[in-house]
Structure formats: C-alpha cells, structure tokens
Image (cartoon, rainbow, N blue to C red):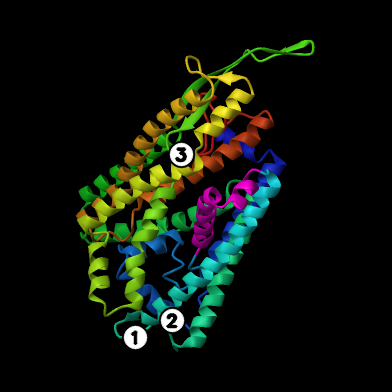
Amino acid sequence: MTASFANIGKVPELRQRLLFTVGLLAVYRLGVFITVPGVDRGLMQKNIDESAGGLFGMFNMFVGGAFEKASVFSLGIMPYISASIILQLLTIVVPTLERLSKEGEQGRKKINQYTRYGAIVLAFVQGWFIAADLEGRQYRGQSVVLESGFIFRIITVLSLTAGTAFIMWLGEQITERGVGNGMSLIIFSGIVARLPLDAYTTLQLVQQEVIQPLTLLFLLAIIGAAVAFVVYVERGQRRIPVQYSKRVVGRKMYGGSSSYLPLRVNTANVIPPIFASSLLLIPATLVQFFPESGLVTQLQGFLLPTEFSYNIVYALLIMFFTFFYTSVIFHPEEMADNLKKFGGYIPGIRPGKNTADYVERVMTRLTAGAAIYLTAVCVLPNALLVMQSNLPFYFGGTALLIVVGTALDTVSQIEAHLITRSYEGFSASGARIRGRRTTVS
C-alpha cells in the first residue's frame, strides 16, 4: 500500500491531476467563508448550533457548513443534483429527451446543458426560500439579517445562484481535468471538512462528562462497523454467466468465449436517501412561510429526526425510491437485446424475452436487499441521535454512503492510472478496487 502511494508521484499526468483536484477543492472551501451581503455570520452560526441535530443541521452538513455561515455557497451542489435527477426521470416520459439519451456523446452534452439550465432555475427558486428563511432567523431576539426587505432578497438570490453556478463549473473542471467525479468530491470535501471540528467538540464533551467514554466507544464501534458494511455492499456484485456463440466472419472465427454480466447490489446508489431527505425537508421550509399554521407546525413536529414517526416515514420513502429509481435506470429488455445482438446468451435461458425476465427477476431480488441495506444504514444514525441527543454532530447514513462511495470511485480511478503505466494497484491481492459504476466485461 505504501509503495502504491509512492508510485503516484512517479506518474506526471496523475500527479498534475491530483494537484489540480486538490487546488479546486481548496478554492471551494475558501468560498464557503464568503458570507451573503447583509447577514451577521456570527449570529447565524449560533442560531444553527441550537438545532445542530435538526433537519437544517442535516442540510448544513451536506453543504460543508456553508449554511451556518450564510455563505454564497449555501445551496452547495444540491440544485444540480436535483436537476440531474429530474432530467433522468423526464427522459422516460419525454420522447425528445429519450432520443437525445440514445444519440451518444452529443446527446449527453445536450442533456447536460439542460441540466445546467435546470440547476440555475432551481437555485433561483431555492435561493428565494433561503432568503425568506434568513429573514425569519433570530438569536436571543437579534435578527441575523441586518436590514430585511425586497432588496436583501434579490441580492441573496443572485449571490446564491451565482455561487451554485460557480460550484457547477468547479465540479465539471475536476471531472474533466482532475481525478474522480467533481460533483461527488465537492460534497465529499464538505462533509469531511467538518470532521476535525466535530471530533474536537466531542472530546471536549467527554472531558466535561457530558458524554461518557463508554458511550463514545460504542458510537465509534457502530460508525466503524457501518463503514465496513457500506464498503462491503457497495463493492458487491451478482455476476450472471454469459456465453458467446461462435461465428465465422470471412476466414476468421469470433466468439466462443465466456464472460459475465455484473449486476450491482445497490444500483440506485445514494439517490433514494437524497430524495427521501429532500421530501422530509419540505415541512421545515413551509414553517418559514406559514409560521401561524397549526397543521404545518404539527407536521414539522411529526417529522423531526428525534421522533419515531420520522424514522418510519424515512424508511418507507427510502424503500420506495430504491425500487422506483432502479426501475428508471435499469432496462433488462435493452440488456437482453444487446446480448442477443452480439451472440451472447445466459446458459439455460433462451435469448430475448426469457433473458429479460430472468435478469429482471434477479435484479428485483437485489433491489430488495439494497432497499433493506440503505434503510438500515440511514435509519440507524437517527436511532443513535434519539439515544444520544447531545451529540455535537449529525452522523448521517446518506453522508456515510457519499463519503465511502466517492472514496471508492476516486481510488479506483487512481488505481487505473497506475495499472495502465505498469504500476501495482492498492490491493495487495492484485484485485482491482471497484467503484460504484460497473460495465459488462
């Protein structure tokens, strides 16, 4: 492992890509400390600290602490993620988008362009909600906004929208000229950046005997076990054997080889928890606009992370979106047609519809296991939050999935650079480290 890390510096292109990635992530982290004009950052941070375990505390974790600083990066990359998910769903419904998705590189570029436009629109709308939320926030009777009004809202919306557009540009540059997926790395850096402060605050609470040492050891053991479990499942595959028939083209014979069709255990990745979390944030947002509504206030209390009802609704939403999103992105009919086109077949299964039905049946079982897995990983931290409500951080399952998955993807890309230049990878056994994306071998 040490030799593999040392080999990174021996590949000039890889070294430059890593330095470029680290440099742009540093720019992003510096931008987190640029506050929206007209907001008292100190009061805002104190206001957020009072609800560190709430829904807005969870949102603040995803944007790397930008929300508690009222930063121009407060929306983070979430508008882009929401827009990309919406475009993926519309691809099934809108024939024009479906045709674009099948046109190769040019079609993908067009869809990415639509995604950027959608992200800007969502950032503008969400920025207006954030501006209204800031005007309603107070700390001990003092408003966090120096001077409320229409001008403040316009400036805030423009600042947040520009911040989101800049983050999108950073993410695309990292993906194109750096190492790893830029959007995922930006979220990853925001989550990881808070770990040192949270660790220091936790140690202080242990010294003050607010948290007992045995309780801390128990929580660390749970976190370690959860990380190991996520790594194990995210690398898991169900390999369906595939046989290719022999065929003669001219004077040469092709085919006759054996391969496999790898189906990921968790095809939906972190999309179900993100969808579920976004829906559960709606009541907290509505309270800012309808503070006198008893129904909205009661709904918000019903969906607090410390409530048992929240965990039930959260688990049901994760299971639903796991099956829904997998059905959106996974098409067994197309997979069966491609196998038939290239002379491939699954032993014991007839090509065509029978193959599609078999693959769909296997994928349904995998999706059921993935739904249980995602629910367990995401609901367990909320149960810990109920047991230990004085934690100085929000240990979220969604954050854990993002961190582990992004780390696996990045290490996989670095390993690919090393192997193509005749260097050994990170695995001592010689096996490749797989990221979250897999292709048919």
Residue 35 visible in the displayed image:
yes
Mark 2: few/some/many CA within 10 Å (<14, 14-19, 20+): some
- Mark 1: give few (<14), some (14-19) or many (20+) Cα within 10 Å: few
Q: Can you say whether 128 is above or below 110 in the image?
A: below
Q: Nearer the viewer, mark 2 or mark 3?
A: 3
Instruction: Give how far across and how far down residue 375 sits, in percent.
Output: 32, 45
Image location of residue 298, percent across then percent down = 22, 69
Residue that label 3 marks: 267
In terms of sequence position, does the residue under pointer 2 or pointer 3 come before the other?
2
The reply to whether the C-beta atoms of the residues labelled 1 and 3 are less than 8 Å apart is: no
Could you tell me if residue 178 is visible in this image?
Answer: no
Q: Secondary structure at mark 1?
A: strand
* SS state under label 3: loop
The tag on residue 52 is none
- Which of pointers 2 and 1 lies earlier in the amino acid sequence? 2
Q: Amino acid at mark 3?
A: Thr
Q: Residue at the spot x=26%, y=50% of the render?
A: 216
Pointer 1: what residue? 142
Residue placed under numbered mark 2 in the picture = 40
Name the kind of residue labelled 2 in the image: Asp
On the image, which quarter does residue 323 sit in? top left
Furthest residue to the right?
250
State the separation of the CA atoms marked 1 and 3. Answer: 47 Å
**Mark 3 residue crowding within 10 angstroms, few (<14) / some (14–19) / many (20+):** many
Query: Can residue 269 be found in the magenta stretch?
Result: no
The residue tagged with tag 2: helix, strand or loop? loop
Residue 153: percent from the left, percent from the top?
A: 49, 82
Residue lying at 34% horizontally and 81% vertically, measured from the top left: 138
Highlighted magenta segment, given as a residue range: 76-102
In the figure, 96 relative to 121: above or below?
above
* Mark 2 in CB contact with mark 1 (< 8 angstroms): yes
Q: Quadrant of residue 133?
A: bottom left
